[in-house]
Image: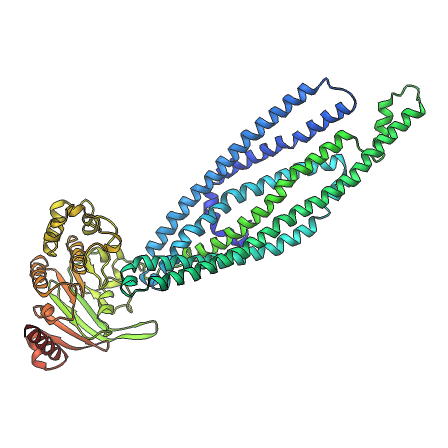
Amino acid sequence: MLPKSLRPLLPYLKRYRWGYLAGTLCVFLTNGILVLMPLVIGRAFKDLSNGDASHLLRYALLLLAIAVGKGTFQFLTRWIVIGISRDIEFDLRNDLFEKLEGLSFSYYQRYRTGDIMARATNDLAAVRNLLGPAIMYTANTIVLMAGALAFMISISPKLTLYTFLPLPVASIVIQYWGHQIHDRFEKIQAMFSDISARAQENFSGARLVRAYVQEEAEIQGFERDNKEYIRRSLKLVRLMGMLWPTLELMIGVAMVLVLWLGGREVLNGITHVALVSDLGISIPGVALPAVTTTLSLSGSIDVGDFTSFLLYMMQLIWPIIALGYVINIFQRGTASLGRLNEIMQEQPEIKDEPGAEDHEIEGKIEFRSLNFSYNGTRVLNDVNLRVPAGSSLAIVGPTGSGKTTLVNLIPRIYDAEPGTVLIDGRPIRDYSLASLRRSIGFVPQETFLFSDRIRENIALGVNLATDAEIHDAAAAANIAADIESFPEGYETLVGERGITLSGGQKQRTSIARALIRNPRILILDDALSSVDTQTEDKILNHLRDVMRGHTTIFISHRVSTVRNADRIAVLHGGRIVELGTHDELLALNGYYSDLYNKQLLEEELAEV
């Protein structure tokens, strides 16, 4: 039965159980051969003490065979067990990435990217060590101690007892320091996450840091975090620095006891034999070696057995020291496994409902008495709106009025109450997420491009997109001319988050990425804010041609962007306060009319 802290690894351990079984067999063979070495050396010493050197070559060959056999199976042990730990690391990394890909958008609003990256790298490495070296050294220690202990008891039960007298003290030390190591390593990993997050944010926000002359402040902040990380690491190092010497002290105490008491027994045996020889005792029919054996059984051991016993003790030194190393790895691994398991136990807030199916989408959208709250704050109130298939809807309103939230409910970036959002008359939760999102081209307010070529960024989500399709999408987004002016054209690398492109170029590339999918529903969330009015007009004209017969929803603060939409919805305080065409809304003399007049005045002032 696995400890509770290791149960998340059970599926992986089962998957590689035959490999671990082979590794265990190699461990038994390695240590089974190794425990024979002290016996051979002890026999050799016994023969030499009796003046017999006739079997030395045989003993030398036996020791060579033991060394070769032990080395061979030790290699196989490491190859199998360490190899399995790498395989499980591979599986864990894939499963972790798959899990992260399936989590809802809200998860990434709660957790920092640097923290997630730290768990996917540093913590994963600690778990790998738990599954490789920790298991291997633990198995070696158990098997070698069991074998050596059996031979030590057969030589002298009393000396064996002396050897393990310090064990209870060592057990208490290990138990106490094990918990301390676990707690301190958790704090170290949390600090490493903070450092990773700070570094990631600085690299991503390099422009902002330089624009606000914050280089020195960020360097100092990073240094503070780094010092705290080092401080926590040194506390663990000090603890580990105390653990190993303590274990070695226990071994030293045991060695002193054995040397003192065992040495006296050897000397007693030699003295008894000498006395027998000096007195010239002669027992008819009984040879001297038989007398010596009888005396040995009375409480003394010979030089050969004592040598074997000491060698067994020497063999146990490394396993006991390795025990401290294993404790360190185990506590680090379980702490990291707990952090990884937090991600693996996370459930996506938005997923396919039971009975959800793939359906063809025409593009009719309806909001019915929609109310929506985010983090306990009401964002949308009693929204009722119908968008006919193939029509265009523009949404305007002040900042914070709920425009972005409303369009995010369509592809289920956030989930509305059941039955309040419908597509083609069908509740949106009846659609599988895959079929729903495949039918929607979404250009979010915050433009994101991958660190790849422009070609791959435009063709994202479209398998085997042709050059013609990529060019047509770029032309429709009015970015084709810019791309073709680059030295490498569509092969141009855009850098992290598209840093090598201007804001307008990034927005137009994102629009091209949405258009190449030929979506039934196109959503543009303030996607033209970074382009000039002339470019905006060109893009809108292209969109009217490309999206004819498809549903288009776009958010904008510019009247020039929305004036030609089939209908315009004015959102204010989470409610639709005005709805109609451009001319109808002007006639109402409400919010839209005020927005139009202000922008008209700004344009007139700009011309003066």
Q: Number of numbered discs present?
A: 0
- The reply to whether residue 186 is visible in this rendering is no
The quarter holding residue 105 reads: bottom left
Please give the name of the residue rendered at 52% of the width and 37% of the height, measured from the top-left corner. 21
Q: Position of residue 301 (x, y in %)?
A: 80, 33
What kind of colouring is applied to the model shown?
Answer: rainbow
The quarter holding residue 205 reads: bottom left
The quarter holding residue 29 reads: top right
Q: Position of residue 420 (x, y in %)?
A: 25, 70
- Which quarter shows the C terminus? bottom left
Q: Position of residue 559 (x, y in %)?
A: 11, 72
Q: Is residue 474 positioned above or below 428 on the image? A: above
Q: Is residue 604 left or right of residue 243?
A: left
Q: Is residue 547 positioned above or below 72 on the image? A: below
Q: Position of residue 359 (x, y in %)?
A: 21, 56
- The reply to whether residue 444 is visible in this rendering is yes
Please give the name of the residue rendered at 26% of the width and 53% of the height, measured from the top-left corner. 496
Q: Is residue 547 positioned above or below 605 on the image? A: above
Q: Is residue 80 positioned above or below 524 on the image? A: above
Q: Is residue 499 left or right of residue 90?
A: left
Residue nearest the observer in this picture, 352 or 111: 111
Q: Is residue 348 left or right of residue 475?
A: right
Residue nearest the observer in this picture, 247 or 28: 247
Residue furthest toward the top?
54
